[in-house]
Image (tube, rainbow, N blue to C red):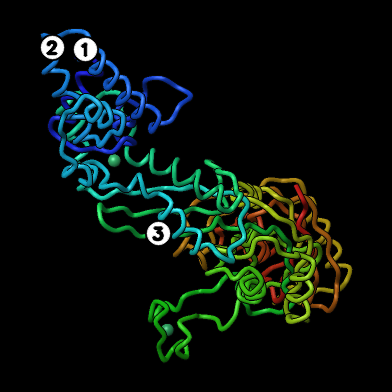
Amino acid sequence: MTIFNKVLEIYKNYSICTYCLGRMFSLLGTSTTNLERGKSLLLSLTMESHGIYLSRANKQDAAIKELIILAEKANFLPAQQVLKNEGFEYSTINSDQSCFLCNDIFSNLQKYAEKAKQLVEGIEFNNVLIGASPDSQIINREDNFKAKFNLLEAESFKSHFNREVGKIFSTFLNKPAEFSNPDLLVIYSLGFDSFKVNITTRSIFIYGRYNKLIRGIPQTHWTCKNCFGKGCESCNFTGKKYPISVEELISPEFVKETKASNTKFHGAGREDIDVLMLGNGRPFILEIRNPVIRNINLEKIKKQVNEINVGKIYINDLKFSSKKEVINIKAKAEQTRKVYKALTEAINDLNLDEFTEKLILLKNKLENKILNQRTPFRVAHRRADKIRKKMVFKIDGKYIKPNLYEFIIETQGGTYIKELINGDNGRTPQSFAEIFGPLNCKELDVIKIYNE
Ligand SMILES: [Zn+2]
Ligand SMILES: [Zn+2]
């Protein structure tokens, strides 16, 4: 069956718009549009039939029949004009029949782009991606149609819609299409008679480093285990186990400036709730979801966050980042070298000489050695019970009182320092307690996190 025969077969049975006609043969001929394809097919058919009518008396009837189909079912003006000139009647009753495949959606795409334009007013974006999800009625009808006429070169409803609405939308707002990582995503839910538009914006990722200057606050908010965040008596109806967190001190200013819906905090590891984060700070990435404003002044926000949280937290080194970097900083955190300051209390009193002697023993035993550390008892309920191999690089110690010492400990990231000190009942076999006798970490601070 030639393309022309297929077209006539289609119009004998259905009315479809010129866009959809061209779309059914979209893989044929490049550097053109579906509308042009459709028009060309209709015009070629009209010319062919007109030619036959003029030159071959025995086929005139068939030629006129074809012209009438084109005039009535495709509402094609050149065919209508030929019939009129040759003195033939045709009916235009069918001419306002809507397209069987798209219900004239494709002749009214302006309306769809216009709606999205209204919805994105005030939203900052540099590029856009249009998506569509046609309902099952549209898809099933189209599938059956293609099967019936053996149309193997068609473009899908969705892809025609996305491209053509995208073109109009981009012209309206002068923003290019971006397929891999668009700032703005416009998704249409399409039915034959109605549609909905859903607008989302790409998250903004901000890298920074934070200091935690007070003890007792977690890095991110902990949902109350008792009520799962709904609010109950034990959490004072906050839904949270701790009233505030580093995340909750940092993020509000970012939400305010970007008019975002919410944020997610990604830390490069985390310190315990009672541990300070000093020195150059811990890297983090704040994911700002559904921002309305993208062009934000990081210096200004940094100043605001730091002013509001004086003495609690401090942020620094802010820069724009990416989703990829989130995975990166999390992966690196397990390896990055860290320096801790630990204030420890002993059961057995030592004099300075005894302390110095034991410190030398400790250094010989642990420095530049691999530690085999089993998951601490205190976290075993939420982390896999396994042996971690961690490098201890350097230990220094300072004698304060017979039972009070300060240690500076440099280790590979992910080492459990409190357990390195107290031995965790043998779960960390090479420990400070082995040499000093029962020893407890009273206060712990992270004082440096290396960059690599
Ligand atoms: Zn159509
Ligand atoms: Zn609760």
As drawn, 16 above or below 443:
above
Q: Please indicate whether residue 356 sits to the left or right of residue 287 in the image.
A: right
Among the 4 quarters of the image, the one containing residue 437: bottom right
Residue toward you, 240 or 179: 179
Circle 2 residues within 10 Å: few <14, some 14–19, many ≥20: few
**Label 2 is placed on what type of residue?**
Lys
Going from N to C along the chain, the mark reached first, 1 or 2, is 1
**For the residue labelled by badge 3, is the local secondary structure a helix, a strand or a loop?**
strand
Res. 59 mark: 2
Q: Do callouts 1 and 2 mark residues in contact (Cβ within 8 Å)?
A: yes
Disc 3 from disc 2: Cα separation: 52 Å
As drawn, 102 above or below 437:
above
Q: Please indicate whether residue 288 sits to the left or right of residue 100 in the image.
A: right
Q: Please indicate whether residue 399 sits to the left or right of residue 18 in the image.
A: right
**Residue corresponding to mark 3:** 197
Residue toward you, 110 or 121: 110
Split into quadrants, the picture shows ligand 2 in the one at bottom left
**For the residue labelled by badge 2, is the local secondary structure a helix, a strand or a loop?**
helix
Q: Position of residue 16 (x, y in %)?
A: 24, 37
Q: Residue at x 78, y 77 (%)?
A: 404
Res. 52 mark: 1
**For the residue labelled by badge 1, is the local secondary structure a helix, a strand or a loop?**
helix
**Label 3 is placed on what type of residue?**
Val
Residue toward you, 334 or 244: 244
Going from N to C along the chain, the mark reached first, 3 or 2, is 2
Q: Please indicate whether residue 85 sits to the left or right of residue 133 in the image.
A: left
Q: Is residue 365 visible?
A: no
Going from N to C along the chain, the mark reached first, 1 or 3, is 1
